[in-house]
Every structure is written in C-alpha cells, then in structure tokens.
Image: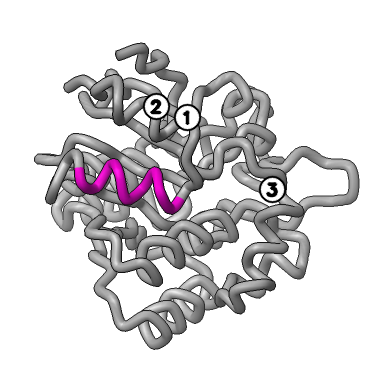
Amino acid sequence: MDFSTTLKDKIIDATPVETLQAIAAAYPGRVIFSTSFGWEDQVISHMIFKHNIPIQVFTLETGRLFPETYYVWNRTLEIYRKPILAYYPNQELLEEMVSTKGPNSFYDSVENRKQCCGIRKLEPLKRALSGNDVWITGIRAEQSLNRHDMQAIEWDEQNNLIKYHPIFSWSLEEVKAYIKENNIPYNPLHDRGFPSIGCAPCTRAVQPGEDFRAGRWWWEDASKKECGLHTHNEVVEK
C-alpha cells in the first residue's frame, strides 16, 4: 500500500481535517479510527463526526473501564449521533484466564499483565483492524519518550497497514484549547490528574512532575509502560 505523491503532499501541508478527508477519499471504506475517549481521541472523533468524514470509529471495550469513560462514550453518541463500534475480548480466552488466575492476576507479574492486555486489547484490536488499510490514532509526540520517537505517518509492520496520527505535533495545551473552543465532551478524570486513562485497575492519577504515562501500570518498571497497541514502526517513505 503506497501513498501517492499527491496524497503525501496533502498530508504534509493540510490541516488534520483536510488530511483525514484526503485519506478517507484515497482508501474508501478502509480507514478506521480507534478511540479510548481521552482528550486526543475526542478531538479526532469531533473532526470525523462534525465533517461527516467516512471513517469508521471503534473502541476496545475491555470490561474494566472507568464509569467516567462510559459517561463520555455515551455523551459522544448523544451529541454526534454517529455509531462507535465496540470490540469485546474473546469470551473463551477471557473466561479461561479469569477462571485460572483470578480477576486481578495482572498485578502479580509482567507476564500476567501482558496476557491480560493481549486478551482484552490486542486480540480485539486485530479483529477491528482486519480488512483496513489505514489506522488513525490520537497519539501525540510529547506523550512519552517512546512516542516522541514515532512519526506522524508510519508503516505498522505488526498489523500490516499504514498508521497515521493527525495531531501528532500538537501540544496538550492545543488539545485542551480545541476541546474548549468546540465544546467537546471529555473524560472528567482528566481534571483529576489522569492524563492517560485506560482500565480502572491499571490506571491512577499522576503526581506533579511525573511522566504523562506514570499512572499506567504504576507498579511496573517505567520501560514497560506500553501494552503493545502502539509499537515503534517504520516511517512511510512512499
């Protein structure tokens, strides 16, 4: 899958909305956006829904989300009246893990935590991305050192598709300003010290001066702060 020279030029020079429109036109019916209803994802959902861009929006329903996340999910549906596909974990895999290891085995070891993330996130993600050519995300460069080394446009070797981050270069202040200007619903946990929000048992508020993702899997070493959804990929040079 190659970006044409014309499309690549549009992506470099265009606004995020124009870029999303160009990608949707270039890959009709094969572009998908993943949301976890955080600040960044709400910005992109607004862009897609407000401008009626034909990009399917989906979320991973892990079964362990915060009540506040369900609140903003529902508010998003009420405001935009657009569908958001929900992908659940494989029932048999989830039942086997919980039956043999208990509901909170992820606290016991990195291996157990990765197994839980694999069942609740990675396997459903594979199903969501299947048949698509472009995966849109809300990743920003300043979120973590790992993400700073990413590129706005990448080839995702793991999932065999193009990965594009439309607000990759935005600062958090720009994200907040866009949300305020457009009256976009957002997760109230952000106002309580949660810059990154995942499953409830695995996310805490961060303290002043801590890293953006310090609240995710806080009991583990800082080098293990990714669940495997977003790994470093090659830049698309097409």
Residue 157 drawn in magenta: no
Q: Amino acid at mark 1?
A: Ile
Task: Confirm whether residue 114 shows in the render.
Answer: no
The disc placed on residue 215 is 3
**Where residue 193 appears, x then y in whole percent?**
77, 61
Label 1 crowd bin: few (<14), some (14–19), many (20+), radius 10 Å:
few
Q: Which one is nearer the viewer's eye here, 184 or 11? A: 11
Residue 24 drawn in magenta: yes
Q: Amino acid at mark 2?
A: Asp
Q: Amino acid at mark 3?
A: Gly
3D distance between C-alphas at marks 3 and 1: 33 Å
Q: Looking at the image, is mark 3 or mark 1 nearer the viewer?
A: 1
Q: Is residue 120 left or right of residue 145?
A: left
Q: Looking at the image, is mark 3 or mark 2 nearer the viewer?
A: 2
Task: Confirm whether residue 57 shows in the render.
Answer: yes
The disc placed on residue 12 is 1
* Above/below status of 225 relative to 67: above
3D distance between C-alphas at marks 3 and 2: 38 Å
Q: Which one is nearer the viewer's eye here, 204 or 164? A: 164
Q: Is residue 71 left or right of residue 192?
A: left
**Where residue 84 appears, x then y in whole percent?**
28, 68
Label 3 crowd bin: few (<14), some (14–19), many (20+), radius 10 Å:
many
Q: Please report the residue visible at 58 percent of the width from the left and 72 percent of the height from the top.
A: 186
Q: Are marks 3 and 2 in contact (CB under 8 Å)?
A: no
The residue stretch that appears in magenta:
17-25
The disc placed on residue 9 is 2
Q: Please report the residue visible at 72 percent of the width from the left and 43 percent of the height from the top.
A: 212
Q: Which one is nearer the viewer's eye here, 231 or 116? A: 231
**Where residue 103 appears, x then y in whole percent?**
41, 57
Q: Please report the residue visible at 25 percent of the width from the left and 73 percent of the height from the top.
A: 83
Q: Which one is nearer the viewer's eye here, 117 or 228? A: 228
